[in-house]
Each structure stands twice: as C-alpha cells, then as structure tokens.
Amino acid sequence: MRKNFGVKTWAYPMPVYIVAAYDKEGVPCCMNAAWGGIYDTNQIMVCLSDDHKTTKNIIESGAFTVSIADAKHVIEADYVGIVSGNKVPDKMARAGLTVERSAFVNAPIINEFPMTVECRLL
Ligand SMILES: Cc1cc2nc3c(=O)[nH]c(=O)nc-3n(C[C@H](O)[C@H](O)[C@H](O)COP(=O)(O)O)c2cc1C
C-alpha cells in the first residue's frame, strides 16, 4: 500500500555530498549538501545557501570538490553539516578530516572519503 507523504524535499535513498573548497589563505572548509546531483554529462549541480563558509570559498576560488562520504565516516560527515567554518575556522581538523590539494583544480580532496569529483565553478 502506498502512502502519500505530501510535498517534501525527499528522494530515497538520498546521498549527502560533502562539498569542499579553500578560502583565500588556503584553509579548507567543507559542508554537507543534500540538494545536488549530476547535471549534463560533465557537470554536477549543488544548491548552496550564500551564507555558508564553503559557498563563499567556492565563489572566491572558483573551484570545489564533491565527495561521497561512506558509512565508516558518518560522524565526521555529520559534523561538517551542523558546524560552520564561519564560527569554527579549523572545522575540518576538528572533524578529523585531512585534505590534499587537487591536481586539477584549486580545491581540497578529503582523504578519508573514497570518491571525489573535482570541479570548476560555472
Ligand atoms: C544532511 C544535510 C544536508 C544539507 N544540505 C545542504 C544543501 O544542500 N545546501 C545548503 O546550502 N546547505 C545544506 N546543509 C547545511 C550545511 O551543510 C551546514 O549549514 C554547514 O554547517 C555549512 O558549513 P560551512 O558554513 O562551514 O560551509 C545540509 C546540512 C545537513 C545536515
């Protein structure tokens, strides 16, 4: 029997992307983004609020990465979705996440996550 849940922001299962970018000083930040997905054959889209530290970083640097977190890192992934780099500048270190610079774009790759898409901002 199907149940009508009404109009909700739901898809199931819903992946949560971890979007990461550097600020002007090269400090990495990242955040959760459930509003996102593939777009055309060589693009990914994410819908990010202006006030997030990660959003500001992406606009400044013109680049970002999108990782898919795994179950092993659910606590770290949860942390970066509820704490802001606007208030906690070393948020990623506090989350226990480490990064290396992408070879393709000016954005951090999060070592702990198994898959990353490296993106230029369009
Ligand atoms: C499960 C989950 C999904 C989220 N999806 C989005 C999203 O798609 N877009 C967005 O702007 N914020 C989203 N957020 C909120 C940001 O991840 C959150 O405010 C984060 O702390 C911003 O970090 P920052 O300011 O360090 O960039 C989501 C949060 C959670 C917990």
Image (tube, rainbow, N blue to C red):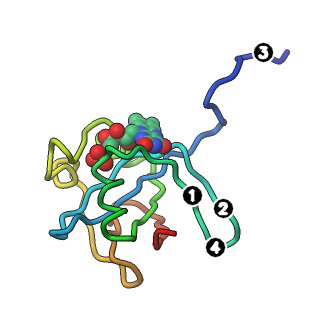
Spatial CA span between label 4 and label 2: 7 Å
**Residue, disc 1:** 45
Mark toward the start of the polypeptide (1 vs 3): 3
Mark toward the start of the polypeptide (2 vs 3): 3
Q: Answer with left or right where residue 43 lies relative to residue 106.
A: right
The x, y position of residue 119, in whole percent, is: 47, 71
CB within 8 Å, label 2 to label 1: yes
CB within 8 Å, label 4 to label 2: no
Label 2 packing within 10 angstroms: few (<14), some (14-19), many (20+): few
**Residue, disc 4:** 42
Query: Residue 3: which numbered mark, if any?
Result: 3
Label 3 packing within 10 angstroms: few (<14), some (14-19), many (20+): few
Image quarter for residue 102?
A: bottom left
CB within 8 Å, label 4 to label 1: no
Which residue is most to the right?
1
Q: In the rendered structure, which amino acid carries the disc numbered 1?
A: Met
For the point 40% across and 66% down, the residue is: 64
